[in-house]
Image (tube, rainbow, N blue to C red):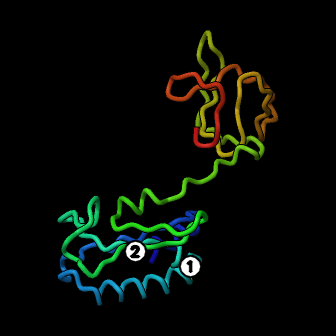
């Protein structure tokens, strides 16, 4: 319950519910349906649409329905969820993960780069370090840091010691 509420509060838009330890219920379809009903009611109250959620019965201990469909639950026909592209279906947790739609990177918004650290390196200069949240950062751009109102030109954009032609959200 707390995980669903926290995920929604933090802006997580897509959800997968892996119903674990199904082996301890002898792969009971009744128990699986009961959990789906209870979980659907709760996630609906939080703000999620249960029709967009994949519910996958698994046994993490034995690996059932994780990578390959399990023979232990012949009643399980697979999960189905609604997506922006239409309907998505599958049987395993891996297929549910693969069906997650990648979020659109907000490159069209103004540049926002919260700084994590600033290094002063002799012979190079001042090197601000952070992760781009929105916008695009390119060498030659003039940027202003808030709240100090310091303006400077971007000399280079690097990630993991590799030069980039531009930085985008996530970099």
Residue 9 in percent (x, y) is at: 58, 68
Note whether 4 is above or below 114 in the view shown: below
Note whether 52 is above or below 123 in the view shown: below
The quadrant in which residue 77 appears is bottom left
Name which residue lies at 53% across and 23% down. 162
Task: Give the left or right position of residue 105, taking residue 102 as reference.
Answer: right
Quadrant (top left/top right/bottom left/bottom right) for the N terminus: bottom left
| Circle 2 residue | 55
SS under mark 2: strand
Foreground residue, 96 or 148?
96
| Circle 1 residue | 46
Q: CA distance from mark 1 to mark 2?
A: 17 Å
Mark 2 Cα shell of 10 Å, populated few (<14), some (14-19), many (≥20):
many
The quadrant in which residue 27 appears is bottom left
Name which residue lies at 65% across and 16% down. 125
Residue 68 in percent (x, y) is at: 26, 61
Task: Give the left or right position of residue 56, taking residue 25 as reference.
Answer: right
Compare marks 1 and 2 and give the one earlier in the sequence: 1
Residue 3 in percent (x, y) is at: 45, 70
Residue 33 in percent (x, y) is at: 35, 87
The quadrant in which residue 98 appears is bottom left
Foreground residue, 28 or 41?
28
């Amino acid at each position: 319950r707390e995980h669903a509420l926290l995920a929604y509060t933090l802006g997580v838009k897509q959800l997968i519910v892996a119903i674990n330890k199904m082996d301890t219920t002898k792969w009971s379809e009744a128990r699986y349906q009961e959990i789906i009903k209870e979980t659907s009611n709760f996630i609906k109250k939080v703000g999620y649409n249960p029709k967009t959620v994949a519910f996958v019965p698994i046994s993490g201990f034995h690996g059932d329905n994780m990578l390959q469909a399990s023979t232990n639950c012949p009643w399980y026909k697979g999960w189905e969820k609604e997506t922006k592209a239409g309907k998505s279906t599958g049987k395993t947790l891996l297929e549910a993960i693969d069906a997650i739609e990648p979020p659109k990177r907000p490159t069209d918004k103004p540049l926002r780069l919260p700084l994590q650290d600033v290094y002063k390196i002799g012979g190079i200069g001042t090197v601000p370090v952070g992760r781009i949240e929105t916008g695009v950062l390119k060498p030659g751009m003039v940027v202003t840091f808030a709240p100090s109102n310091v303006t400077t030109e971007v000399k280079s954009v690097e990630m993991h010691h590799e030069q980039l032609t531009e930085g985008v959200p996530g970099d």
